[in-house]
Structure formats: C-alpha cells, structure tokens
C-alpha cells in the first residue's frame, strides 16, 4: 500500500504538457425535397447535388498529420426518417482495393466508417462501417471511446460499387436507430475514418492525434438537421425452431432411445419506450445457433470463466458491466453481473440407483422470459435494467417404468439495475449498480443454494487536463441470505475457505444465515498526451464478498496493488512502424496482513515496416503464498518462478498468414516446468473464402499437484503428486460468404488431454523456508497400488497395515465439438439459420498421452448430432 501511495503522489506531481485544442470542422447538410434516395452504391440520384462535398482528410497512421495517400470525399442528406451518406473513396490503383468478405463486425479490408454523436454529449456515439465488399459493421461507443461495443446490431442499409476512380459507398441510417433530443435544430458530433488496407493506413476527417485521450469529444460538427422528430422503434421478431437430435442409444434407458425431436417457438422484441430508452425482450428464447464453449481440463480450485455468446445477453451489455478490478481489463472477471448465470446447467443432479434408475435431466435452465431497458437521456443519464425469470426445473426419473419428478433448479428471479451520470461534458462520471437473485426453494435436496443474494456498487471518475489524467473509485457490497447448511457450504467454498487453520481472522460459523462483504478499487492514471501512459491501482475483496449468484468472483480475502507504465512510439522509424514498451509490477496481501505474492514484468510489442509483428516479455514471480493450493487447508508457499514468452506474426494482409507463440515457466528448486506452444494459420484463396487452423500443445510437469485431502486419525493429510500433463487442441474454422447476407461458417475443435501422477507426497510444513521441508515423499515401503480398486494405499506408521488410501488421479479426457451454420438474412432483420452441431466426449484413467490412439478412441465414440432450423421474421410496427 505504501508503494502505491508513493506512486500516486509522484504521478499527481507530473502533469506533462497539455495539447493545444484542434479547430473543429463543420459540415452543413440539407433536407431532401424529392423523396428518398435509392441505396444502390451508385450516387447518381440528383438529390446528391443539393450539398457540397466534404473532405480534407488527414492521415492518423502510419504517418500522423500527413496527407493521405488517396483522397476521400463525402456528402450527407436527410429526410424525416433517415440520414443518407455518400462517400467517394478515390484510389489510383483500383485493382489493389481489398474487397474481402467477412463476418459482420469483423472490419476486414478497405472500409469507410462514420461515427455519429447524435446525443451531442461528447461521450457516446454510434458507429457504422461499410467495407469495399459491402459488409457492414456497427458499434455503440461509450465512455468517450474507451468502450466500443460491437454486439450492437442496428438495422441500416449500405451498398458499394467499384468505379474507375476507386469505390463508392452509399448508406442509409434510419433515425429509429439513433438517439437524439426533441428540438428544432440539431448539432451532432461526427467523424469519418477511412482505412486503406494494403498500406494499413487510416485517415480521419476530423484529425485526432494518436496520443490523444478520448475519442468522441474530438469529433467535428454536423449542422443543418432541423425539424426532425425522434422516432420510436417497435420491432418484433417471432421465430420458430425445429430440432432433431441423434445420440447413442442406451439399452434399458427410456430417455436414451437414440433420437429426440423438438418443435418450439418464441419471440424477441425491440421497443422504443422513448427516443432515449429502448426495451429489448425475449420470450422462450432459443440459442441453438450459438457456438459451443472451448474444451478444457480445470485442475484448479476455481470455477472456469466462459464468455457470453447468446445474442440477447451480449447486445448492449456494456451498460450492465461493473468490474471491481482496475486497469480497464476487458476480461470481465470480478464483476457484479455475469450473464452466464442465467439459463445455466441446473445446480442439482439426483442420486440414482445404478443400472435401475434413469433420468431425463435438463441440459440448461429454461428462460421463461427476459427484458432489458437501456439508453441514455438527454440529461446525461445512462440507464440499464435487466429482469429475467427461470422456472422450477425438474428431472424425470424412471424406475422400472414408474416415473417421478425431482426438482433440480428452483424458480429464480434475476434483476440488474445500472445508472451512470455524465457531468461537465463527461469530465465527471458518477454511477451505481444493484443486483438481486431470489430463489423459491421447495426441495430440501437443493437447500445448499442461497435463498436470496444482493449486491450494490458505486463508481466515480474524475478527469482533468483535457482528460489526459483521471482518478476513479469503485466500491461494492454484497449480502447473501440462506439457511445454515447453505451458508456453511458458502463459507467453505473455494471463494472463501473460511476453514483455513492459519487464518485467525476468519472462521466457519455453522449457525450463521447471512454473509456480507465489500470490495473496490482506487485507481489513478495518465490516459493520453505524450509517449508515456501509466496507471496505478489498489483492488480489495474482503473475505465475505460473494458475487456468484448473478456475478463472478473467483476469490475474496485479497488486496491487490498494480502499477503499469507504457512508452509508445507510433511514428515509423528504421524498420519499425510502431513500438510499445511496457512495465508492470504487482503485490498482493490478505486481510490478515500477510504478503502473499509479488512480481514484475517487462514486455515489448513491435510492428515492422513489412507488416510483420513481434512481441516478447519476461516475468518474475516471487515466492507465492497460496491460500487455495490445499483446498481449504493452510496456506502453502510455492516457489518463485521465471516466465518468458514470445509471439511472431506475419503480414495479415496476405493470402496466407502465420503466427507462432511460445511460453515457458520454470519454478525454482526444480518445482516445475510449464511449456505452452500455439500457432495459427489463416488462408484466404479469394475474397469470399477464409480457412484457419489454430493448433496448441501444452506440456507441464509440476512437482506438487494437489490430489486429495484424506482424514487420518482426525487429522487432514494433504496428498500431492508430480504430474505430467500433455494437452493438444486444434481450433478449425471455415467461412464462406456467398453475399454479405448469406454465409456458411464451420467451427470444429478436437481436444485431448492426459495427466499422469507419480512421486506421491504428503504436506508436512507448508510454509517451511526450505522447499524440500514442505513435504514428505512416500517411500516404496509406505505406498502401494491396489489395481483391483484402482487406489493407492498408505502405511504411514510402518505397521504393515493400510492407514488410508486415495483414488488413482490419472486421467485422459477427449472431446470433439463442432458447429456448421448457414446464416441467411433474407430481409433486413429477418434471419434463417440452418445448423448442424456435433459433440463427442470420452474419459478414462489411463493417464497416457498418445496422439494417434487418443484421436482414434475419440472418433470411435458415438457422436451426439443436432440438426436445427430456426427462422425469424421482423415485424416493424
């Protein structure tokens, strides 16, 4: 903490220089008088003659402040319902214009982009991108450009055409997709960006230096829009889904007959409550077209984090984001809201009589309905409210033809509310968030779940010196209510580990029925102006902080201090296009005042003039006192380590692109070696087809890998082993674009992992100064393998009798997941999906990695095939 305060005081004393404000450009538009413009990419409508060309773009990269290599001109018109944009992208070598097809929001090839701050709050904007092949991209920009949300998918229109002098873009943006006040005369912020892909060149209409802080408040001005009325959007998207599953038939199991048919329907909707606020809702949603999560083997004490992929939950999710940790990390760990909690796998699985009882168990919790109310008012209030209801879920259990139902997930209501207020043109931002989870538990078997859980947070950010510097505060509180059984489980979970014998400031209270906690972050940084940027923060999470009913938290009881600094060079020199040098330092403590870890890192990122890229870094982690390593036992000291990594990528503009990554970590005292290899190959034989393959291979050999905690004579014995784990995976993608609105996409990933354990040990003194004094390795006289029961027996007191035993921890895990999706947007906002998904999974305890044998075993498994057709239709009311 003292280091952080010292860094903060030093930083506050260093203000550097302040940039001179750049004069803002203005463009004057006019209203159409002869009816709407037909969007065909030609710009031959006479109405375009009503206004003058705008232009005079300035290059931002690679040569900041210079004239672009190719000129760009635009015109803007409007009528009562739409904004029209025409852009002439001159190019002296039209044959070199990159017209590659891609997914919406992938932003590949040459493109033109317009950003519109229709709120004129200098904090938020709407971005519309059209590449030379006619592929659209769109993003909602918030926090003055710190957050670009590409999950926002408005309905708008764009066409392109090749001409002798370059290429033309013609765009129509309905006012229903923008947000603006109800007044006679409008002045909107506006920015144009053009990218010329072959040069990796970006030029701007309103010049913004590379080292500028923020984005939206630098925009130029669009004038001349008068007497338009805010438009209320009302769109309904009813859909039907037909699904056929084929899976392995299981003799005697009435629920595994080999096939299953499902026909369902639902409706999504988007309703403009006011011009500022939009209500999104879904009833009986289906997400069958969503790509499966990647495979993994999790040997840690903590829950895995998977990113959200369901369209309803990802679109506009930025307003519901409330991260505790500092640094602006986009990885949303430690967050008050983690949408994957809604519709998750049910918590409880019934105990079945082996070979006699069978269960029809729901794969996911049904979402009866959900709605989101989001938007930003003209007074600067950003609002986000989400409500979702999941019903009581039952598993049907069959015993010799007699069926019964057993509750596996209770009726649950989820609520999330978020507000933020911009003050003084966004130089001050205050906000808050509240969440609640309420369950109606009627089955005593699932009383391990909390009955209710609530979290709340406040945040404050103050900018100064033209937003070059900032200080922010985030603080959260949580409260969980449950019966004593559930509360005991929560206290003993990996998030808390209140049972740790060496933590005298916490303990398990088996009578308590509630748990409260708090956390937060204090952060200071320099975000712009000059070559140097830095940020320092302290994050704390109290032992009782609990977010995991609707949020995400891996561990409480931690104080985390970080300092980061970067020196950036963005003007080409020598063989470099640009370069960044980064330094990091961090320290952690627990709430008992113990220093748990410290480390440092230096890394560099380089882009070369031949458009290759190279990055490397070196990390040092000191001795680490882990409170989770013994799964609720005392903290254990882990040896220090060094880590080195490097990444090399070839020119991404070429038809073939390769990248390679390698990372190695070595612990002191030969306590472990961790090797990670990965590569990526992308091949584009033409503009419409893209094929990629990303293999990875990991080989790790920790000397101390947790195996099991065994009770012997009322004492816990913490069993460790040397583990050799090898993991291979291959992510494969094929994308073929027939038109910008009709595509075929394939994803597949075979995954195999094997872990072999040896040299078993018991922990003796987990914090001994000498590494080898922290454990005792069992001798041949003390340990024996029982092949019949697949267990290891321990004779600790050498009396020729087994004192305790533990299961053989060896494992092999193999999985294959794939999705083939044909997507056709046959009308704007109306979509048809044709989907084939396949999954294969198997596991055993052999513990041997053999690529050929493991792959053969995997593809000998009966696949689980799902064929799905989903059709939605947009009703515009």
Image (cartoon, helix red, strand yellow):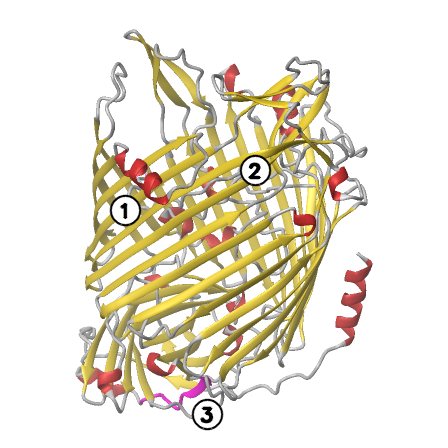
Q: Give left or right: position of 82 versus 850.
A: left
Q: Give left or right: position of 86 versus 785.
A: left
Ranked by sequence position, the earlier of labels 3 and 1 is 3
Crowding near the residue tagged with mark 2, few <14, some 14–19, many ≥20 C-alpha atoms within 10 Å: some
* Secondary structure found at label 2: loop
The percent coordinates of residue 299 (x first, y second) are 54, 38
Crowding near the residue tagged with mark 3, few <14, some 14–19, many ≥20 C-alpha atoms within 10 Å: few
The percent coordinates of residue 39 (x first, y second) are 20, 73
- Which of the two residues, 756 or 406, is positioned nearer the viewer here? 756
* Secondary structure found at label 1: strand
Front tag of 2 and 1: 1
The percent coordinates of residue 832 (x first, y second) are 20, 49
Q: Find out whether the residues at labels 3 and 2 contact each other: C-beta distance under 8 Å.
A: no
The alpha-carbon separation of the residues under discs 3 and 2 comes to 51 Å
Residue 318 vs 508, above or below: the answer is: below
Task: Give the extent of the magenta segment.
Answer: 53-61
Q: Which residue is mark 3?
A: 66
Q: Quadrant of the N terminus?
A: bottom right
Q: Which residue is mark 2?
A: 548
Q: Which residue is mark 1?
A: 819
The percent coordinates of residue 430 (x first, y second) are 63, 58
Marking on residue 302: none
Q: Residue at x 56, y 57 (%)?
A: 664
Q: Find out whether the residues at labels 3 and 1 contact each other: C-beta distance under 8 Å.
A: no
* Secondary structure found at label 3: loop
The furthest residue to the front: 781
Tell me if residue 192 can be seen: yes
Q: Residue at x 47, y 40 (%)?
A: 297
The alpha-carbon separation of the residues under discs 3 and 1 comes to 46 Å
Q: Residue at x 49, y 50 (%)?
A: 384
The alpha-carbon separation of the residues under discs 2 and 1 comes to 30 Å
């Amino acid at each position: 903490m003292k280091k952080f305060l010292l860094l903060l005081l030093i930083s506050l004393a260093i203000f550097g220089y302040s940039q001179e404000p750049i004069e803002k450009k203005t463009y004057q538009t006019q209203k159409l008088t002869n009816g709407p413009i037909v969007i065909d990419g030609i710009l031959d409508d006479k109405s375009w003659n009503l206004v003058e060309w705008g232009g005079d773009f300035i290059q931002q990269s690679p040569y900041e402040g210079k004239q672009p290599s190719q000129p760009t001109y635009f015109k803007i018109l409007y009528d009562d319902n739409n904004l029209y944009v025409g852009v002439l992208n001159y190019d002296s070598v039209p044959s070199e214009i990159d017209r590659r097809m891609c997914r919406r929001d992938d932003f590949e090839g040459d493109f033109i982009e317009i950003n519109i701050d229709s709120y004129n709050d200098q904090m938020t904007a709407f971005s519309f991108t059209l590449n030379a092949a006619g592929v659209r991209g769109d993003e909602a920009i918030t926090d003055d450009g710190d957050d670009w949300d590409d999950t926002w998918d408005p309905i708008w229109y764009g066409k392109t055409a090749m001409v002798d002098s370059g290429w033309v873009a013609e765009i129509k943006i309905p006012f229903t997709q923008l947000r603006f006040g109800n007044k006679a005369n409008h002045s909107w912020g506006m920015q144009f960006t053009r990218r010329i892909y072959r040069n990796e060149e970006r030029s701007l209409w309103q010049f913004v230096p590379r080292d500028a802080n923020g984005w939206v408040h630098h925009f130029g001005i669009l004038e001349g829009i008068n007497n338009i009325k805010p438009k209320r959007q009302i769109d309904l998207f009813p859909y039907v889904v037909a699904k056929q599953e084929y899976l392995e038939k299981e003799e005697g199991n009435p629920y595994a007959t080999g096939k299953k048919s499902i026909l369902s329907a639902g409706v999504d909707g988007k309703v403009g409550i006011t011009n500022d606020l939009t209500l999104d809702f879904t009833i009986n949603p289906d997400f069958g077209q969503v790509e499966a999560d990647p495979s993994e083997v999790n040997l840690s004490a903590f829950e895995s984090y998977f990113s959200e992929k369901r369209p309803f939950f990802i679109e506009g999710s930025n307003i519901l984001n409330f991260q505790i940790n500092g640094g602006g990390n986009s990885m949303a760990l430690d967050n008050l809201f983690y949408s994957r909690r809604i519709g998750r796998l049910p918590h409880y699985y019934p105990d079945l009589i082996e070979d006699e009882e069978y269960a029809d168990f729901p794969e996911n919790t049904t979402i009866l309905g959900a709605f989101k109310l989001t938007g930003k008012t003209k007074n600067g209030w950003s609002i986000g409210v989400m409500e979702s209801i999941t019903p009581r879920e039952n598993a049907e259990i069959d015993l010799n033809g007699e069926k019964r139902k057993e509750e596996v997930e209770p009726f649950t209501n989820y609520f999330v509310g978020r507000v933020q207020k911009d003050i003084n043109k966004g130089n001050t931002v205050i906000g808050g968030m509240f969440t609640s989870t309420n369950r109606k538990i009627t089955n005593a078997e699932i009383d391990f779940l909390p009955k209710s859980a609530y979290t709340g947070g406040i945040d404050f950010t103050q900018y100064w010196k033209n937003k070059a510097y900032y200080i922010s505060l985030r603080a959260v509180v949580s409260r969980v209510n449950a019966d004593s059984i559930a509360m005991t489980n929560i206290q003993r979970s990996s998030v808390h580990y209140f049972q740790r014998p060496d933590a005298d400031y916490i303990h398990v209270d088996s009578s308590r029925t509630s748990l409260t906690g708090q956390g937060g972050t204090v952060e200071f940084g320099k975000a712009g102006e000059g070559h140097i940027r830095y940020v320092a923060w302290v994050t704390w999470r109290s032992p009782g902080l609990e977010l995991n009913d609707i949020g995400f938290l891996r561990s409480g009881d931690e104080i985390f201090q970080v300092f980061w600094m970067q020196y950036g060079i963005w003007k080409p020199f020598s063989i470099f296009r640009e370069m960044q040098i980064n330094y990091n330092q961090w320290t952690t403590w627990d709430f008992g005042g113990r220093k748990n870890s410290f480390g440092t890192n230096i890394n560099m990122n380089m882009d070369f003039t031949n458009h290759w890229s190279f990055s490397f870094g070196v990390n040092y982690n000191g001795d680490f006192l882990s409170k989770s390593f013994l799964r609720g036992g005392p903290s254990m000291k882990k040896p220090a380590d060094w880590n080195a990594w490097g990444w090399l990528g070839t020119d991404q503009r070429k038809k073939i692109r390769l990248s390679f990554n390698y990372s190695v970590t070595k612990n002191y005292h030969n306590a472990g070696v961790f090797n990670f290899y990965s590569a990526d190959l992308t091949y584009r034989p033409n503009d419409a087809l893209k094929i990629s393959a990303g293999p990875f291979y990991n080989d790790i050999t920790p000397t101390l890998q947790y195996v099991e905690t065994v009770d012997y004579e009322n004492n816990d014995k913490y069993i460790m082993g040397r583990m050799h784990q090898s993991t291979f995976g291959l992510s494969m993608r094929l994308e073929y674009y027939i038109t910008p609105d009709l595509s075929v996409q394939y994803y597949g990933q075979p995954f195999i992992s094997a872990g072999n354990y040896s040299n078993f040990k018991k922990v003796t003194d987990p914090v001994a100064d000498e590494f080898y004094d922290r454990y005792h390795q069992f001798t041949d006289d003390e340990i024996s393998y029982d092949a019949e029961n697949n267990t290891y027996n321990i004779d600790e007191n050498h009396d020729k009798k087994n004192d305790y035993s533990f299961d053989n921890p060896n494992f092999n895990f193999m999985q294959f997941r794939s999705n083939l999706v044909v997507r056709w947007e046959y009308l704007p906002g109306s979509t048809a999906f044709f989907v084939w998904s396949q999954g294969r999974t198997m596991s055993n305890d052999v513990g041997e990695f053999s690529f050929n044998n493991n792959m053969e075993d995997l593809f000998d498994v009966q696949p689980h095939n799902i064929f799905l057709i989903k059709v939605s239709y947009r009703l515009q009311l």
